[in-house]
Amino acid sequence: MCPGDISHGSSEIRGDGDEDEVEKVWFYFVIALGFATGLWGVIVTLWLKKNWRHAYFRRVEDVADKIYVAV
């Protein structure tokens, strides 16, 4: 085997492919958990705070109107 055949960081050389798989699963789990937390944080805030909800949807309508006028 030549030194250039396999990269130095590959799992064949280190022999810890299972650890890489566990890290990958945890990585995607944490990303999904953060996305869900952020999404529900926005949804619950808009659901509970009436004045924030009205301001948010007023802003969405203003942006939609600007896009409509531009097109």
Image: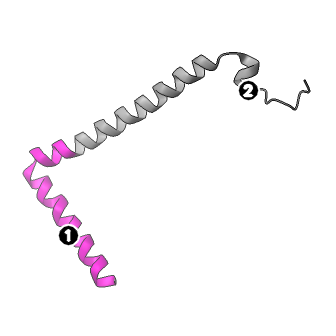
Residue type indicated by callout 1: Glu
| Residue designated by label 2 | 9
Q: Which residues are magenta?
A: 43-70
Q: Residue at x 76, y 19 (%)?
A: 13
Picture coordinates of residue 61 (x, y %)? 20, 69
Q: Residue at x 92, y 27 (%)?
A: 2
Looking at the image, which residue sits at the far left? Answer: 50
Q: Residue at x 16, y 66 (%)?
A: 58
Residue 63 on the magenta span: yes
| Residue designated by label 1 | 61
Q: Which label was assigned to residue 50?
A: none
Of the numbered discs 2 and 1, the one sitting upstream in the chain is: 2
Q: State the CA–CA distance, disc 2 to disc 1.
A: 51 Å
Front-lying residue, 14 or 68:
14
Picture coordinates of residue 35 (x, y %)? 35, 39
Query: From what the image shows, is residue 62 above or below residue 37?
Result: below
Q: Residue at x 7, y 52 (%)?
A: 50
Dots 2, 1 in contact, CB < 8 A: no
Residue 55 on the magenta span: yes
Front-lying residue, 12 or 27:
12
Q: Quadrant of residue 9?
A: top right
Query: From what the image shows, is residue 64 above or below residue 16?
Result: below
Judged by depth in the image, the label closer to the viewer, 2 or 1, is 2
Q: Quadrant of residue 36?
A: top left
